[in-house]
Image (spheres, rainbow, N blue to C red):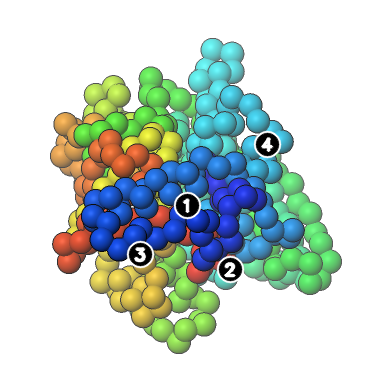
Amino acid sequence: MTAETEGSLDEDAPPAGVAFEEDAPPAPGTPLRDREQQVLDRIARARRRRPVVREERITLAHGSGGKATQTLVQAVFLEAFRNPRLAPLEDGATLALGGARTAFTTDAFVVSPLFFPGGDIGDLAVNGTVNDLAMCGARPAYLSAGFILEEGFPVADLRRIAASMAAAAAAAGVEIVTGDTKVVQRGKADGCYVTTAGVGLLERPVELSAARARPGDAVIVSGPIGEHGAAIMLARGDFGIEAPIVSDTAPLHGIVAALLDDLPPGGVRALRDATRGGVATILNEVAVASGVCVVAEEEALPVRPEVTGVCELLGIDPLYVACEGRFVAVVDGQHAQRAVEALRGHPLGAGAAVIGTVRDDPPGLVLLRTAFGGTRIVDLLVGDPLPRIC
């Protein structure tokens, strides 16, 4: 569970598109700054309300990584399982076992199609869990693998997926040491679902959390964004678009280690891999958890032209498109250039860039300075135009 603490409106909140009297538009003639403050006040009130799942049945939006997912996690799972190690809702839990500090995480993969340019559900399942451990600052060591298979699924495809997982595990330096297999009736699943869990060792005295960002920090992305999501969109063949885009799926623990080793202790505040919901969701999680404002620069965002083109054709903002081999780092602003140089020294970080800064006001918001000189709020999406992206 990696969703942060956003949540949808309470039952007392108005339905979408309907405002209470207190939230009526500002009167004509209200100064611009006052109107802006009223909007910010309404956002702050909404975020203080208790998250409530209003739907009676699960929808695809609940799996998108956006507001609906966060509400579900908080109102159902966190409510049931609440404990100090789960409460931060980071990419994994850090645990003290005997004399060792470890990180533990789990993930599930339902990507469609199972095979896509640049990868498949197998290496995605390995890399995804390896990367969650890396975001905790850990060296991944051991994984489990669980399979839910549909009756009639081709054994040849299962062998291909298993071989891909074995190759990805070898490349990441981890072992798959336990697992489980279940088969359901034909029509009760979509071929193959995979779950992985992982354990890693925390060998550095690091404390990484979305709640540790401070005003003056720099926000860095490790490379061009949106490639995995764009590759999946095209692989589905629903839009009749062709472009030379492949998934960026890759293990990130090596490049993370390079960053942590190059910066002084405490220089790296937070790490998050930009999967479901993309970079925009990560920035919102940091802003809310730390009570800060993240200001991103549109012109600084590294996006390959072909990804930009596909997103423009489909009306999708690359900020919300998933990556599987990129991460967001919040670092001490004094060490921003040093961090970028450390990332660019690794094969996976050649396109690393500073994309924004952290300031104190307005807290809990992400602002984007656009290429046209304006500023807009980058909010969480309720759902996702690209379900089953990982």
Which quadrant would the C terminus be assigned to in this image?
bottom right
Residue name at image x 43 percent, y 43 percent: 44
The residue beneath circle 2 is 112
Visible residue check, residue 298:
no
Badge 2 amino acid: Ser
Disc 2 is placed on an element classified as loop
Q: Nearer the viewer, residue 217 or 327?
A: 217
Tell me if mark 4 has few (under 14), some (14-19) or many (20+) residues whose alpha carbon lies within 10 angstroms of its own.
few
Closer mark to the observer between disc 4 and disc 2: 4
Q: Is residue 91 above or below residue 10?
A: above
In contact (CB < 8 Å): disc 4 and disc 1: no
Image quarter of residue 320: bottom left
The residue beneath circle 4 is 79
The residue beneath circle 1 is 22
Q: Is residue 130 above or below residue 390?
A: above
Closer mark to the observer between disc 3 and disc 2: 3
Mark toward the start of the polypeptide (3 vs 2): 2
